[in-house]
Amino acid sequence: MELDFEVVDLPDADHVEEGDEAPDFTRPLVNDEYWEDVALSDLLNDGPVLLVFTPMDGAFPSTYIWNELRDRGVAEYGAQIAGVSISSPYEHKTTIEERDIQDFAGLFSDPQNGVAEQYGVSHDLDGMAGVSEPRPAVFLVAADGTVEYAWVADEWPNFPDYDAVEDALAGL
C-alpha cells in the first residue's frame, strides 16, 4: 500500500506507565454545553477516566481516534472519557459536535501543552521552534489515581490498539 505521507519514528518518551500515579492537573474541560476549569482528581471522584491525548483538533489522527472510540461505544464501559489537546475551547466545542461525542466527559484545553509534558507525551513539531503538541496516547486511570493501562505512540502516525483499550476498560 502506498501512503500519501511518510511514517516517522518518534524519539523515546519517558511517559507515565501502568502502576504509576497519574499526575493531577486542572484545565478547562469543554463539553457540548459549556466549559469550566476541572481537575482530573475531580473527575476521578466519579470513577475511572480514560484520558486520551490527541494532536490538535481537526488533525486526521485526532479525527480517527475520536471516531473509532465513539463507534466502539467505549463510554458504555463506565469510565469517563476525557481528551487532552492543545486546541482551544472553541475548537473543542466544534469537535464534540462534529465527532458526535457528547456522551464523553469532555475535552481538556491545554494550549501550552503542559499536561502532555507532565505525562511525558509532548512532541516538538519539526521546524516550529517552541511549538509542541501531544503525541497520541491513552491512559486508563482508576478512581484512586493509579494508571491501569498506558499506550503512547512511538511513530507518526500511530493509533492505539482499540481492542486492548476495550479489554482494559472491561477489566475495571
Image (cartoon, helix red, strand yellow):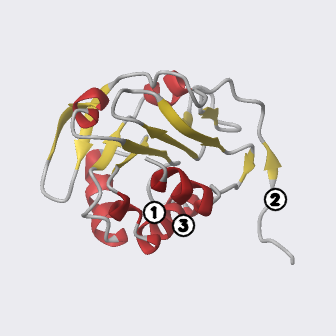
- 42, above or below 83, in the image: above
Q: Nearer the viewer, residue 127 or 99?
A: 99
Q: Nearer the viewer, residue 13 or 150?
A: 150
Label 2 close to label 1 by CB (< 8 Å): no
Q: CA distance from mark 3 to mark 2?
A: 17 Å
The image's mark for residue 6 is: 2
Crowding at mark 2 (Cα within 10 Å: few <14, some 14-19, many 20+): few
Q: Earlier in the sequence, mark 3 or mark 2?
A: 2
Q: Nearer the viewer, residue 77 or 123?
A: 77
Q: Nearer the viewer, residue 73 or 15?
A: 73
Q: CA distance from mark 1 to mark 3?
A: 6 Å
From the image, tell me which residue sits under label 3. 64
Question: Helix, strand or loop at disc 1?
Answer: helix
Q: Position of residue 125 (x, y in %)?
A: 64, 38
The residue drawn where x is 31% and y is 71% is: 100
Amino acid marked by disc 1: Trp
156 sits to left or right of 130: right
Amino acid marked by disc 3: Tyr
Q: CA distance from mark 2 to mark 1?
A: 22 Å
Q: Position of residue 171 (x, y in %)?
A: 49, 50
From the image, tell me which residue sits under label 1. 66
Label 3 close to label 2 by CB (< 8 Å): no
